[in-house]
Image (tube, grey):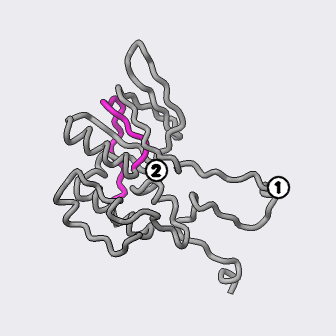
Amino acid sequence: MPDMTPAPAGRDLDALIVGAGFAGLYQLLCLRDRLGLKVQVLEAGDGVGGTWYWNRYPGARCDSESHAYNYTFSKELFEEWEWSERYPDHAEIRRYLDHVADRFDLRKDIRFGTRVVGARYDEAANRWSVTTEAGETLTAQFLITAVGCLSTANVPKFPGLESFQGQWYHTGQWPQEGWISPASASG
């Protein structure tokens, strides 16, 4: 199980990255390790994975061949990871991203459970002010939004949904504990 200890709060940073999926992890690695910048990732979820963290519904899997899901910036990483399937499922993709985060010690600069609710650019100061759901404000010269195109669940406006009394789930907001049918829960 990965360490979920939140990264220390850095209020004045060189760069802030929103999202800990494929793009966010790679940006963290490049900015921190290659350029030596003071960087922090803000991630709403409790783990790495981005889209693959949230989309964990039964049957979720990659529609591209597994070799397309490898980072290629490190020959060692590329050679040490072996995909078990041609089209891996969400659990294997998450294991891969956990492996990458651990391999390059990325978690120390990721604040999990931190949702960004606003960002404002101050042109005179050449800085971004980013506000979290908890009311905290962080500043950085660079802001990278690595939230991806599937980061927000698009819930269709079905007539009667707001008054529906039963349980319903969106694939992009699947419960962490999985779905339990009412029939199996009662007996």
* Element at label 2: loop
- Identify the residue at image location x=49%, y=25%: 120
Of all residues, the one furthest to the top in this rendering is 124
| Magenta stretch encompasses residue 169 | no
Q: Is residue 90 above or below residue 15?
A: below
Mark with earlier residue (1, 2): 2
Q: In the drawing, does residue 72 fall left or right of residue 66?
A: left
Residue 117: x, y in percent?
54, 37
Query: What residue lies at 43% left-to-right and 46% top-to-bottom?
Result: 19
Q: Amino acid at mark 1?
A: Pro
| Boundaries of the magenta span | 3-20
107 lies left or right of 152: left
Q: Label 2 near label 1: C-beta < 8 Å? A: no
- Percent position of residue 9, x then y: 36, 39
Q: Which residue is mark 1?
A: 159
Of circles 1 and 2, which is in front?
1
Residue 24 lies, in percent from the top left, at 37, 46
Q: Secondary structure at mark 1?
A: loop
The amino acid pointed to by label 2 is Gly
Question: Quick check: is 7 in the magenta stretch?
Answer: yes
Q: Pick the quarter of the image with the C terminus.
A: bottom right
In the image, taking residue 70 as reference, residue 115 lies left or right, namely: right
The secondary structure making up most of the magenta span is: loop
**Residue 158 at what x, y percent from top left?**
78, 55
Identify the image quadrant of residue 186.
bottom right
Dot label at residue 113:
2
